[in-house]
């Protein structure tokens, strides 16, 4: 079949709307009609050329939701008409990682996914016979995408796809990092660096966990109003102070916060986030993705004296078994999504969504197909 997709032809170039050929789903694969997709910072990161795994030409996008249009041979857990969220972290249930009970990082399709290919090593997308690469196993910036069965979460049929698409990355990542990775306790103090879709979701998760103090940090003060709506108790612009931000937070919190979250992808801020944690027990969770080749540093004594550095991918959430519960938590009012959708637009205007993100004017733009 043919459909419309936004193709990333090369790093730094705007996406181009093209008619692409989409091959039928093969064994273990599913054809999804995309209904909506968010645009996440990680799409911009890959498009910038900073992503060491970035491959072009590709169809980006990983925050989508849609409807099963066709299934390939051997697909047993999904049928035509099911509503689904594509997962950039699959859940096969059978690999060492899935069975460990210690991680959500299923490796069943990891190698081919990282090469922009389906598990059989080929692409389902092409233009004039030339293959176009998949992205993160999802490629949601296309009217139709082919996704492995194990990379699709089946969700409640009544969930509004134009909202719950954001559970495909940003909101789940932030809430999950708080609840699964840090396991923030009631009464804990929390610092959140970066107040985009991820950071605001961390704040939402911290409030759900019953944190007593949530310190929100951003250099763009227009983010503060929404941070407060989600539960931030203090908002700080580090540029307004002479003292290093970590020192400021340590002074504000009688020795540092119990938990901090880096939601930017800036290695200097990662250090600040670690060093604003309380001696003896403070934990810092890295969520932001830094550019190719960048490294973090701190004095080892920071760790010797009890601070802990951790990372979190997709909030530690196992997509097939746990994401449907997040969708239901949205439907029953436990998780907020609507305020994150600051803009909506058709696929043809997707480059505007990137511009809004770069200017710091959007939290999430949702593309409606
Ligand atoms: P975003 O661009 O919407 O938000 C980033 C925020 O950080 C902005 O509000 C910006 O003003 C602020 N900021 C920038 N520099 C700062 C500084 N020096 N100090 C304080 N604030 C600063 O991005 P997003 O969509 O929220 O994504 C955030 C990061 O999380 C990105 O690196 C993205 O790639 C990553 N991410 C990781 C995962 C994961 O599973 N680990 C999932 C999704 C996204
Ligand atoms: O298993 O090696 C692996 C990587 C799995 C993907 C983890 C991605 C998390 C960070 C990227 C941001 C996603 C939008
Ligand atoms: Zn994302
Ligand atoms: Zn697995």
Image (cartoon, grey):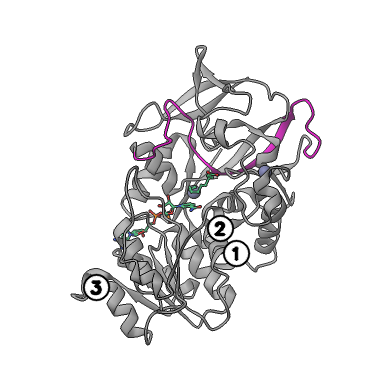
* Label 3 neighbour load within 10 Å: few <14, some 14-19, many 20+: few
Q: CA distance from mark 1 to mark 3?
A: 30 Å
Secondary structure state at the residue bearing disc 1: helix
Residue beneath disc 3: 244
Q: Position of residue 286 (x, y in %)?
A: 44, 59
> Which quarter of the figure has residue 54?
top left
Visible in this render: residue 280?
A: yes
> Which segment did they paint magenta?
50-78
Identify which residue is drawn at 63% across, 28% down.
Answer: 119
Figure quadrant, ligand 4: top right
Q: Between 184 and 295, which is closer to the camera in this rendering? A: 295
Q: Is residue 100 above or below residue 59?
A: below
Q: Position of residue 304 (x, y in %)?
A: 40, 72
Q: Between 78 and 189, which is closer to the camera in this rendering? A: 189
The quadrant of the rendering that contains the C terminus is top right
In this view, the residue farthest toward the bottom is 254
Q: Is mark 2 within 8 Å of ligand 1?
A: yes
Q: Earlier in the sequence, mark 1 or mark 2?
A: 1
Q: Is residue 234 above or below residue 40?
A: below
- Circle on res. 315: 2
Q: Earlier in the sequence, mark 1 or mark 3?
A: 1
Q: Is residue 69 above or below residue 327?
A: above
Q: Is residue 70 magenta?
A: yes
Q: Between 289 and 219, which is closer to the camera in this rendering? A: 289
- Circle on res. 180: 1
Identify which residue is drawn at 34% across, 84% down.
Answer: 252
In the displayed structure image, the side of residue 48 where residue 350 appears, left or right: right
Secondary structure state at the residue bearing disc 2: helix
In the displayed structure image, the side of residue 292 where residue 165 appears, left or right: right
């Amino acid at each position: 079949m043919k459909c419309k997709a936004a193709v990333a032809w090369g790093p730094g170039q705007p996406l181009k709307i093209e008619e692409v050929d989409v091959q039928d789903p093969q064994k273990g694969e599913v054809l999804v009609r995309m209904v909506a997709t968010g645009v996440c910072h990680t799409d911009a990161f890959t498009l910038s050329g900073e992503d060491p795994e970035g491959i072009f030409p590709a169809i980006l996008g990983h925050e989508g939701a849609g409807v099963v249009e066709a299934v390939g041979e051997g697909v047993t857990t999904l049928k035509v008409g099911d509503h689904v969220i594509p997962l950039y972290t699959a859940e096969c249930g059978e690999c060492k990682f899935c069975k460990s009970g210690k991680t959500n990082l299923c490796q069943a399709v990891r190698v081919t996914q990282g090469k922009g290919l389906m598990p059989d090593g080929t692409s389902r997308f092409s233009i004039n016979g030339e293959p176009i690469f998949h992205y993160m196993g999802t490629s949601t910036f296309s009217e139709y995408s082919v996704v492995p069965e194990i990379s699709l979460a089946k969700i409640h049929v009544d969930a509004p796809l134009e909202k719950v698409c954001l559970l495909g990355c940003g909101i789940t990542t932030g809430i999950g990092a708080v609840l699964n990775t840090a396991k923030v306790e009631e009464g804990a103090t929390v610092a959140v660096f970066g107040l985009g879709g991820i950071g605001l979701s961390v704040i939402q998760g911290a409030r759900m966990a019953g944190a007593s103090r949530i310190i929100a940090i951003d250099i763009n003060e227009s983010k503060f109003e929404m941070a407060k709506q989600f539960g931030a108790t203090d908002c700080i612009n580090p540029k307004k102070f002479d003292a290093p931000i970590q020192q400021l937070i340590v002074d504000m919190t009688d020795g540092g916060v119990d938990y901090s979250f880096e939601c930017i992808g800036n290695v200097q801020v990662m250090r600040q986030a670690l060093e604003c944690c309380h001696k003896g027990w403070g934990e810092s969770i890295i969520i932001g993705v830094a550019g190719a080749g960048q490294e973090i540093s701190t004095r080892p004594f920071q760790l010797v004296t009890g601070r802990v550095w951790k990372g979190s991918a997709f909030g530690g959430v196992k997509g097939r078994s746990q994401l449907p519960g997040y969708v239901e938590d949205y439907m029953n009012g436990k998780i907020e999504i609507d305020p994150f959708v600051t803009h909506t637009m058709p696929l043809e205007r997707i480059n505007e969504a990137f511009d809004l993100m770069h200017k710091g004017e959007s939290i999430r733009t949702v593309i409606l197909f």
